[in-house]
Amino acid sequence: MARLLDDWLRADPERLGRWQFELETASSWKPDEIDVLLFHPRPPTAYAPWLQFRTVLTVTDEDPSVQAGRFGAELTDNDPRGYAEICGGSAEFARELGYEWPPRPA
């Protein structure tokens, strides 16, 4: 399920890119959850500020390919700042990008 979602999101990076986010990974450590990690506004570099955001999705018994498409649409139709929590980066980067540090739960 996580791989299907990861593939769906990577198929068109502009879906998240319009919000200035990039997929790091969609992975699963539990059978009923998918962890989605995103970078904002870009993946980590030594030269520019970045933050990592995380959201957890609950997997149901819905057909996996249908569910991956639904999750993908839900994630990309809305600005991730509204549903994902900051889980990585630094206080300095957060200030530079206009976020509070330590991060508040979404």
Image (cartoon, rainbow, N blue to C red):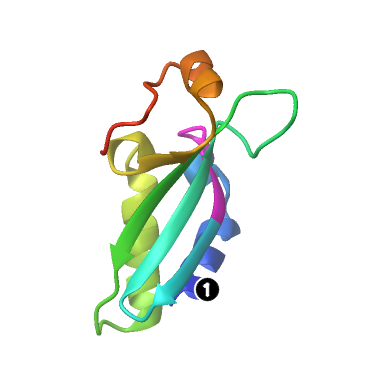
Locate residue 70 relative to residue 29 in the image: left or right: left
The answer to whether residue 82 is above or below residue 27 is above
Q: Give the range drawn in magenta.
A: 17-24
Which amino acid lies under the numbered mark 1 shown in the image of this protein? Arg
The answer to which image quadrant residue 101 occupies is top left
Residue 23: say if magenta: yes
- Mark 1 falls on what kind of element? helix
Identify residue for label 1: 3
Residue at position x 55%, y 59% in the image: 25
* Farthest residue, direction right: 46
Which quadrant does the C terminus fall into?
top left
* x then y, percent, for residue 55: 36, 52
Q: Residues within 10 Å of mark 1 (few under 14, many from 20)?
A: some
Locate residue 31 relative to residue 44 in the image: left or right: left
Residue at position x 39%, y 70% in the image: 68
Q: In the image shown, does 88 or 33 lie closer to the viewer?
A: 88
Q: In the image shown, does 104 or 28 lie closer to the viewer?
A: 104
Q: How many labels does the image show?
A: 1
Residue at position x 49%, y 19% in the image: 97
The answer to whether residue 71 is above or below residue 76 is below
Which quadrant does the N terminus fall into?
bottom left
* x then y, percent, for residue 42: 61, 35
The answer to which image quadrant residue 78 occupies is top left
Q: In the image shown, does 90 or 72 lie closer to the viewer?
A: 90
* x then y, percent, for residue 26: 49, 63
Residue at position x 26%, y 82% in the image: 62
Residue 49: say if magenta: no
The answer to whether residue 101 is above or below residue 38 is above
* x then y, percent, for residue 65: 40, 78
The answer to whether residue 82 is above or below residue 35 is above
